[in-house]
Image: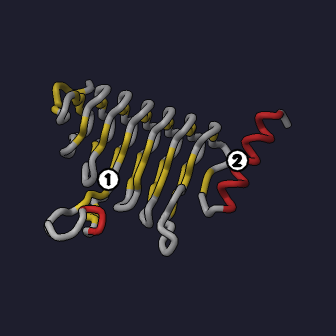
């Protein structure tokens, strides 16, 4: 076994001790954080399918929810996923560097309480198969991105995108379709 193979086995073993389900064929780069700082009473669940690649500095935090990542998914450097309301990413999806995917939001109805003490709204977020999120894309809670979509760098996705749409901008707007 090569030194890299030994390092990968060690990283997988460390994650398994924390309850992270990770296929043996996944590559985990240094600095990856899975399940960091979950609520003590409800740690949540992370599932990563086979043949995935998690780049440098990736952070997957379920916050009591569930993060499910399909087969052959690539998460580029410094991707952050908060799974409080549930996040699902389909097979063969490419999430470029510095993307952020969330699945909840704060409520602000009570002016007498600080925002952090007010309840969260859980907003399940789904990203389909064969999707490409360009660098720095932000996917807000409650959004479904259809199979085959391409989202341009720096876009903020605030509404559902139909399958095979090409979307760019803030907020993301559909400008075309993949043929």
For label 2, the crowd category at 10 Å Cα-Cα, with few meaning under 14, some 14 to 19 and many 20 or more, is some
Quadrant location of the C terminus?
top left
Name the residue located 51 percent from the left edge and 33 percent from the top edge.
77
Q: Secondary structure at mark 1?
A: strand
x then y, percent, for residue 92: 46, 37
| Label 2 sits on residue | 11
Q: Secondary structure at mark 2?
A: helix
Sooner in the amino-acid sequence: mark 1 or mark 2: 2
Q: Locate residue 56: give its quadrant.
A: top right
Task: Mark 1 and mark 2 in contact? Answer it, CB < 8 Å.
Answer: no
Give the residue at the far bottom of this rendering: 41
x then y, percent, for residue 90: 42, 46
The CA span between labels 1 and 2 is 28 Å
| Label 1 sits on residue | 125
Left or right of 16 on screen, residue 171: left
Counting the numbered discs, the total is 2
Instruction: Please determine whether, in this image, residue 173 is positioned above or below residue 159.
Output: above
x then y, percent, for residue 155: 26, 32
Residue 30 or residue 126, whichever sits in front: 30
Residue 86 or residue 130, whichever sits in front: 86
Instruction: Please determine whether, in this image, residue 71 is positioned above or below residue 98.
Output: below
Left or right of 142 on screen, residue 54: right
Name the residue located 30 percent from the left edge and 63 percent from the top edge.
116
């Amino acid at each position: 076994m090569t030194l890299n193979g030994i390092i990968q086995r060690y990283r997988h073993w460390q994650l398994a001790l924390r309850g992270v389900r990770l296929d043996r064929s996944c590559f985990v780069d240094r600095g990856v954080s899975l399940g960091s700082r979950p609520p003590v009473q409800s740690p949540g669940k992370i599932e990563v399918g086979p043949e995935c690649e998690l780049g440098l500095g990736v952070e997957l935090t379920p916050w009591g929810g569930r993060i499910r990542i399909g087969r052959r998914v690539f998460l580029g450097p410094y991707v952050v996923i908060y799974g409080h309301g549930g996040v699902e990413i389909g097979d063969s999806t490419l999430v470029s560097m510095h993307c952020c995917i969330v699945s909840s939001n704060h409520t602000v109805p009570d002016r007498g309480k600080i925002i952090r003490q007010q309840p969260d709204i859980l907003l399940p977020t789904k990203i389909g198969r064969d999707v490409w999120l360009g660098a720095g894309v932000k996917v807000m809670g409650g959004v479904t991105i259809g199979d085959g979509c391409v989202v341009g760098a720096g876009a903020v996705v605030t509404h559902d995108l139909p399958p095979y749409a090409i979307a760019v901008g803030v907020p993301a707007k559909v400008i075309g379709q993949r043929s």
